[in-house]
Image (cartoon, coloured by chain):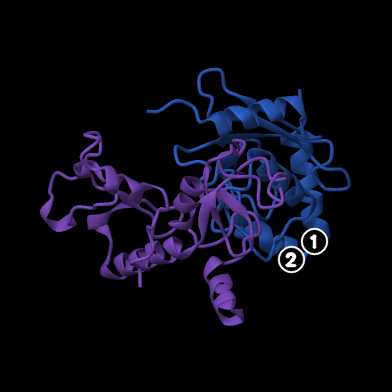
Chain colours: A blue, B purple
Amino acid sequence: MSGLPRRITKETQRLFQEPVPGIRATPDEANARYFHVVIAGPADSPFEGGTFKLELFLPEEYPMAAPKVRFMTKIYHPNVDKLGRICLDILKDKWSPALQIRTVLLSIQALLSAPNPDDPLANDVAEQWKNDESEAIKTAKKWTARYAKEK
Amino acid sequence: MGNCLKSPTSDDISLLHESQSDRASFSTDPDLEPPPPYQEQAHMPLYHPTPSQARLATQLTEEEQIRIAQRIGLIQHLPRGVYDGGPDGSEKKIRECVICMLDFVYGDPIRFLPCMHIYHLDCIDDWLMRSFTCPSCMEPVDAALLSTYETN
């Protein structure tokens, strides 16, 4: 395997020097391609007050291929399934090498503010979100309180 | 079509000095691709029918092979150049190639997309083989190519 591309080093440095508000991404000590991510639930969303852990991995092909990102913290969200996988176009067919770790995490933060039940990954959650949004939001808040509060 | 594609402006000179320099070895010309079916031990390049897939040339369907061949042809039609800051310094503002995130250095081979975004040649060609879109503006490159043909 070749050494770490300059781009990854540069992105890591910039994330450290100019952190994104509400987001923390730290490279793993043993693997510079693996990041421990924490995103704060955005204000005025059912996830407010929660801190959500994610893992982000830069595959060998990066930046020609998108990073792999997954929620580690349980979350009630129509675009996140039980395994924490995220339905987000830029992580799939809309990936572009002009995007970065920073922009990916900002997009995930935005997805928390604006769930999109019309493009669901967790079907039952999306159904609930479409049929009875206020009930869905209540459940999301409950899950946030139960699983996403730092002890 | 296609003959004028790889027409570097600088290397033809070496033909005039052929006997003076023994270093000019024609056997290592990277542009000379061996015919794939007969070279069993040849290094097999990976192709990407879609950005998320990687397959050996032998594992591609005929349709994919045709598409990839067409893609290679189209890419070679895109103008290439050398980073020199632009004719009036217009490219000076663009410091870094967004793909590798390294600063452009005078003399770097670059490619211009129809939307006028520029990248290192190797960086953008690698991406265009996967997706024929500009990484910065997501503009489909072939659509833009067609429209420039029409306007010219």
Could you confirm whether marks 2 and 1 are on the same chain? yes
Q: In which quarter of the image is residue B70?
A: bottom left
**Residue at image x 17%, y 57%?**
B35
Report helix, strand or loop for mark 1.
helix
Q: Label 2 to label 1, Cα distance in Å?
A: 6 Å
- A68 or B78: which is nearer to us? B78
Q: Quadrant of residue B144?
A: bottom right
Question: How many C-alpha atoms fall within 10 Å of the one at disc 2: few (<14), some, or many (≥20)?
Answer: some
Report helix, strand or loop for mark 2.
helix
User: Percent from the top left, x then y, of residue A83?
Assistant: 55, 44
User: Percent from the top left, x then y, of residue B127?
Assistant: 49, 52
**Residue at image x 51%, y 31%?**
A5
Image quadrant where one finds the N terminus of chain A: top left
Question: How many C-alpha atoms fall within 10 Å of the one at disc 1: few (<14), some, or many (≥20)?
Answer: some
What residue is disc 2 on? A130
Image quadrant where one finds the C terminus of chain A: top right
Do the numbered discs 2 and 1 sit on residues whose CB atoms are within 8 Å? yes
State the residue lying farthest toward the right: A44
User: Percent from the top left, x then y, of residue A14?
Assistant: 70, 29
Q: In this view, does B77 lie above or below B93?
A: below
Q: Residue A133 carries which label?
A: 1
- The answer to whether A117 appears left or right of B81 in the picture is right
- The answer to whether A37 appears left or right of B40 in the picture is right
User: Percent from the top left, x then y, of residue B74?
Assistant: 43, 66
Residue A75 seen = no
Chain letter for mark 2: A
Q: Is residue B152 above or below residue A44?
A: below
Residue type at mark 1: give it.
Glu
**Residue at image x 50%, y 41%?**
A62
**Residue at image x 45%, y 50%?**
B126
- B111 or B129: which is nearer to us? B111
Chain letter for mark 1: A
